[in-house]
């Protein structure tokens, strides 16, 4: 794909992800649906390549479920889904981009005191997308201003993750023009608040979390000697915004909502895999001993993973035993046990565990991946292929599935099926050129028969057609 235009739009969408004009003008002609799809593909391709983007299937699945729930409360059609990706960064931030893509920092997940607080931020970002704010800020700028602002926009993109870098950029000749645009977006933040509040309410979350999260951030910032969190810099909280939200909340009946256990376990898993295992173990043991953590079960869950990271299997098992009663309640607890069995080399028991877990939580991705890896590592190739082919019929767009299938067919000596599945792996990771390359290798494979080649040639034509379409 031609990347220059896409890259510029990417930079622009990062820097101005808070613009909130009204609906229904000519912005659709500025950025067409087709252009947005191109941008979306490039964004997700870059996200898949980035080492800082979280690849954990359980945490990503949780974010996907939460996002879908919020989308049901929005004006988005089911044919226009939003994709989320999680960046391993302790700064508190989230940002909407062109192409219906939202980035979430792990720091935001840590900072949210409840699932509704996390949902409130995501609802705010979804509102930027539903109201088509990003295309409209591009429309509002003349072509000349847009061109001369690109260098500044790039600097502001970098500053989304490191706001301190913005200071030098703000001293450039173009800074004043771009800053005036940022000021304009701040004036319209409350429009995103209003729409986000509606989304939150329709999705069944506690609407008051919207204001409680903003207040928590604002209060924490008052007592901080360092720079303001990234989220506050890109989403400035004003008294006017807070007052507007509070006025609206007086018209909404109080709604008590209990968090899903998965929210606490996701935060716990992030904590367990961050930094030094010894430091995590020490902190978690203190929380459990003093009962100072938000959720004791989640603390035991995190402690078990931290012990596993540190190679302390006995202690990990002891921590797991404190929450083993939750295995029928939450799939993440079953996956923790699977990791314990794997580290303990209990292969037969692990296979039985995964099969039983799949009966309780059918089609859970982490179980499918784990069981497939087990079969492949123990040379049970036929079992791996049967499992993965069954799952393929249920989740045909799962890139990881095709990577595992390619590995299985490679071990089985089938070059054609190896390259065919690798092609689909790259295709669903938005790397069309490598997808075409792999499908070409499938056609040339010595074990491909006439019908195999015919199917592969047809698929190659489809992929090449997309490449031509997006390159024009």
Image (spheres, helix red, strand yellow):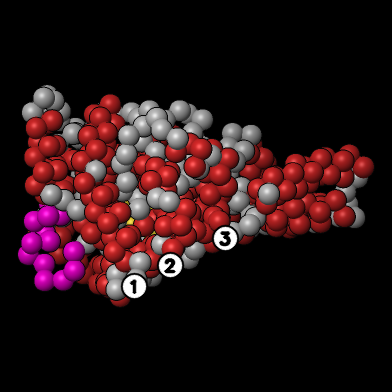
Q: Which residue is mark 2?
A: 151
Quarter of the rendering occupied by the N terminus: bottom right
Residue 215 versus residue 346: which sits nearer the camera?
215
> Measuring 67% from the left and 40% from the top, which residue is drawn there?
389
Q: Are marks 1 and 2 in contact (CB under 8 Å)?
A: yes
Disc 1 versus disc 3: distance between alpha carbons?
Answer: 22 Å
The disc label shown at residue 172, or none: 1
Q: Residue 100, relative to residue 24: is it above or below?
A: below
Give the class, few, some or many, for how many residues have Cα within 10 Å of label 3's Cα (few <14, many ≥20). few
Local crowd at mark 1 within 10 Å, few (<14), some, or many (≥20)?
Answer: few
Contact between marks 1 and 3 (CB within 8 A): the answer is no
Residue at image position (78%, 51%) is: 439
From the top left corner, tell me how far across and down residue 19 is, in percent.
32, 46
Q: Residues within 10 Å of mark 2 (few under 14, many from 20)?
A: some
Q: Above or below — where is 141 with respect to 203?
A: below
Q: Residue 242: percent from the left, percent from the top? A: 11, 43
Location of residue 107 in the rendering, given as x and y in whole percent from the top left corner? 28, 59
- Decide if residue 353 is in sight here: no
Instruction: Choose the circle earlier in sequence order: 1 or 3.
Output: 3
Alpha-carbon distance for marks 2 and 3?
13 Å
The furthest residue to the right: 450
From the image, tell me which residue sits under label 3. Answer: 4
Give how far across and how far down residue 54 sits, in percent: 43, 58
- Dot 1: what SS? loop
């Amino acid at each position: 794909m031609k990347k220059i235009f896409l890259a510029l739009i990417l930079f622009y969408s990062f820097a101005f992800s808070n613009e909130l004009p009204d609906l229904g003008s000519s912005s659709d002609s500025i950025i067409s649906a087709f252009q947005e799809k191109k941008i979306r593909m490039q964004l997700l391709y870059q996200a898949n390549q980035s080492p800082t983007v979280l690849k954990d299937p359980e945490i990503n699945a949780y974010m996907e479920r939460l996002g879908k729930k919020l989308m049901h409360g929005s004006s988005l059609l089911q044919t226009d889904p939003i994709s989320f990706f999680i960046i391993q960064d302790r700064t508190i931030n989230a940002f909407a981009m062109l192409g219906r893509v939202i980035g979430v920092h792990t720091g935001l997940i840590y900072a949210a005191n409840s699932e509704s607080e996390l949902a409130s931020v995501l609802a705010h970002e979804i509102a930027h997308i539903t109201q088509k704010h990003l295309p409209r800020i591009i429309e509002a700028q003349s072509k000349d201003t847009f061109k001369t602002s690109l260098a500044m926009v790039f600097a502001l993109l970098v500053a989304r993750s490191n706001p301190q870098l913005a200071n030098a950029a703000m001293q450039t000749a173009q800074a004043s023009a771009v800053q005036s645009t940022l000021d304009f977006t701040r004036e319209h933040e409350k429009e995103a608040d209003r729409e986000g509040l509606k989304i939150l309410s329709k999705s069944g979350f506690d609407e008051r979390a919207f204001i409680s999260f903003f207040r928590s951030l604002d209060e924490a910032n008052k007592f901080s000697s360092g720079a303001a969190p990234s989220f506050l810099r890109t989403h400035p909280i004003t008294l006017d915004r807070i007052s507007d939200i509070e006025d609206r909340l007086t018209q909404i009946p109080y709604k008590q909502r209990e968090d899903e256990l998965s929210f606490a376990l996701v935060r716990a898993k992030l904590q367990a895999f961050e930094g030094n295992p010894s430091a995590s173990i020490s902190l978690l043991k203190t929380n459990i001993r003093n009962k100072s953590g938000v959720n004791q079960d989640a603390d035991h869950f995190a402690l078990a993973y931290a012990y596993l990271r540190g190679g302390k299997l006995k202690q990990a098992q002891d921590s797991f035993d404190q929450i083993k009663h939750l295995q029928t309640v939450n799939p993440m607890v079953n996956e923790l046990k699977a990791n314990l069995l794997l580290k303990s080399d209990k292969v037969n028991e692990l296979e039985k565990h995964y099969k039983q877990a799949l009966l309780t939580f059918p089609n859970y991705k982490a179980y499918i991946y784990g069981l497939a890896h087990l079969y492949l590592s123990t040379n049970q190739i036929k079992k791996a292929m049967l499992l993965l082919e069954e799952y393929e019929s249920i989740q045909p767009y799962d890139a990881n599935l095709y990577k595992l299938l390619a590995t299985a067919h490679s071990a089985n000596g089938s070059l054609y099926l190896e390259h065919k599945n690798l092609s689909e792996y790259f295709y669903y990771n938005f790397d069309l050129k490598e997808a075409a390359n792999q499908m070409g290798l499938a056609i040339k494979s010595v074990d491909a028969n006439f019908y195999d080649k015919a199917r592969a040639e047809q698929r190659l034509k489809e992929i090449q057609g997309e490449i031509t379409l997006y390159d024009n």
